[in-house]
Amino acid sequence: MTTPGGIDDYLATLPDDQARCLQDLRERVIALLPGSEEVISYAMPGHRLGKKMIAGYAGFTKHCSFFPHSGSVVPAFAAELDERGFTYTKSGVHFTPEGPLPDDLLERLIAARFKEAGLA
């Protein structure tokens, strides 16, 4: 896949269920980060405040992922992610259109990244 020119272009490259799921995530992130700039970073949609990337997301063959652009935020939530049945890496949380990130978890992941970035 080539680097998308914008977030709408990126979403248009995905299967419909992933595009809808990530559009919903996009809207929730915008609500949680008013004033953030929507950008393409690392070939995926993201949200930046000032010079700090706070949140990103992407669609993959078998899942979607949320990235707080930090190697320490996701590990801090490992026990809860395990309990809720989400798979993850140190940099991202994986989910599906059938099992999206719950609002409360998304809000806390973003708040943790916001604090870590020194924006809280």
Image: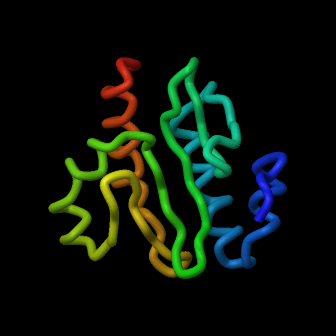
Quarter of the rendering occupied by the N terminus: bottom right
Question: Where's residue 111, x and y in %?
Answer: 36, 36
- Quadrant hosting residue 93: bottom left
Q: Residue furthest front?
A: 2
23 displayed left or right of 73: right
Q: Of residues 42 and 111, which is closer to you in this image?
A: 42
Residue drawn at x 32%, y 26% is 115
> Relative to 6, does residue 15 appear above or below in the rendering?
below
114 displayed left or right of 57: left
Quarter of the rendering occupied by the C terminus: top left
120 displayed left or right of 5: left
Q: Of residues 12 and 102, which is closer to you in this image?
A: 12
- Quadrant hosting residue 18: bottom right
- Quadrant hosting residue 25: bottom right
Question: Where's residue 110, x and y in %?
Answer: 40, 40
All told, the count of numbered labels is: 0
Residue drawn at x 35%, y 46% is 109
> Relative to 4, does residue 32 appear above or below in the rendering?
above
Q: Residue furthest left?
A: 79
Question: Where's residue 44, x and y in %?
Answer: 65, 51
Question: Where's residue 116, x and y in %?
Answer: 31, 28
> Relative to 113, does residue 74 appear above or below in the rendering?
below
- What sort of colour scheme is used for the picture? rainbow
Residue drawn at x 43%, y 44% is 68
Residue drawn at x 26%, y 71% is 84
> Relative to 49, does residue 3 appear above or below in the rendering?
below
